[in-house]
Image (cartoon, helix red, strand yellow):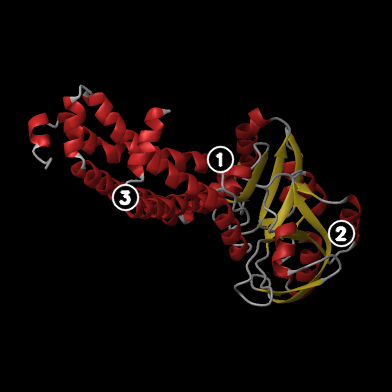
Amino acid sequence: MYWLKLTLRNALRHKLRTLLTLLGLLVAILSFGLLQTVVDAWYTGANAAAPDRLVTRNAVSLVVPLPVHYRDKIRGLDGVRSVAAANWFAGVYQEPKNFFPQFAIDAAPYLAMYPEYRIDPDQLRDFMRDRKGVVIGRKLADTYGLKLGDVLPLRGTIFAGNWEFVIRAIYEGATPRTDTSQMFFHWQYLDETLRAKAPQRSSLAGVFVVQVSDISRAAEISAGIDALFRNSPAETYTETEQAFQIGFIRQTEAIVIAIRIVSFVVIFIILAVMANTMAMTARERIAEYATLKALGFGPLVLGGLIYGESLAIALSGAALGVALTFPVADWFGAKMGTLFPVFEVSSETVWLQLLSAVVVGIAAAWLPARRAARVRIVEGLRAIG
């Protein structure tokens, strides 16, 4: 208790200097936490992928569709529990900045594969009965003020024209990390419309989502699906849902790497600031350290005082930074709307923030503690008087 009291008194000797250092630490730890949360948000889709779901796409490119009759052939494979066709729609709601994922799906089998999307049974029944009905996520509904029964107009980009849908269901997430910013509508409605307006684009699916009965056979079943269509006009490439999601992330991997680098640069900068603070502190107290040595206190005690003060300042700043990370992340996530479907500070991020503070506290104290431990009594006492 005595050493703790002494450490705190040392830290508060120069209140303005300590306050400014704490402020710098707070900003650095807060920035580090937010940048790490951005990276986590980037990987949300991949982390939420289920191991029993596969995605089959055209082997040439994702933008090249597949004949929808592939669905029945895939369904007949041993080990396949369910198959659903899906198309990326990419419609514009009101203005281009209002981006959110939109999918035309085989409603019944597709939604059954995603138990993390919690839909009220009555709402689900209404959706299944309405060919123009849509299911939207809770975050999407809250972001744009949408509610059940509202007409949702979209201007098609991939599928040209003005489309109108009716909101029949709003799904909730099973966990806070479930993406609730998406919209789903009936693939049959899209196909029927295309058959009337652009027959050459009908009876095609962007991807097939495949649920397997045995996770251990996922690789075998993936190879089996691709073997079915080898040497056909539209060969396939099948991978796990997680690998499929990571494929998208790789397209922007440079951005993710840059964000990671910036987050650690922020910590390095505050390390330099903290090291300067502790160096100034140690230089001012050379005479005190020499006096303590003359009284019989060893190098470990002197080093312990400096390390204790440095860690106390670093951890105090980190505590404030961590505490502010949560409300700032909530505010930031709300401002981003559906751009980041899930923007939640993870426990791993908090531990990284605290670990960074400990590293900064220890590293900043290393040279001052070494200098204090090596100070010669005679040279140190010269400063007195």
Q: Are marks 3 and 1 in contact (CB under 8 Å)?
A: no
Which mark is on residue 347? 1
Q: How many marks?
A: 3
Under mark 3, the amino acid is His
Under mark 1, the amino acid is Ser
Which mark is on residue 127? 2
C-alpha distance separating marks 3 and 1: 34 Å
In front: label 2 or label 1: 1
Residue 94 occupies quadrant:
bottom right
C-alpha distance separating marks 2 and 3: 66 Å
Foreground residue among 330 and 312: 312
Q: Residue at x 71, y 69 (%)?
A: 144
Give coordinates of residue 288: x percent, y percent. 20, 36
Q: Are marks 2 and 1 in contact (CB under 8 Å)?
A: no
Left or right position of 229 against 85: left
Left or right position of 218 against 115: left
Badge 2: residue crowd in 10 Å (few <14, some 14–19, many ≥20): many
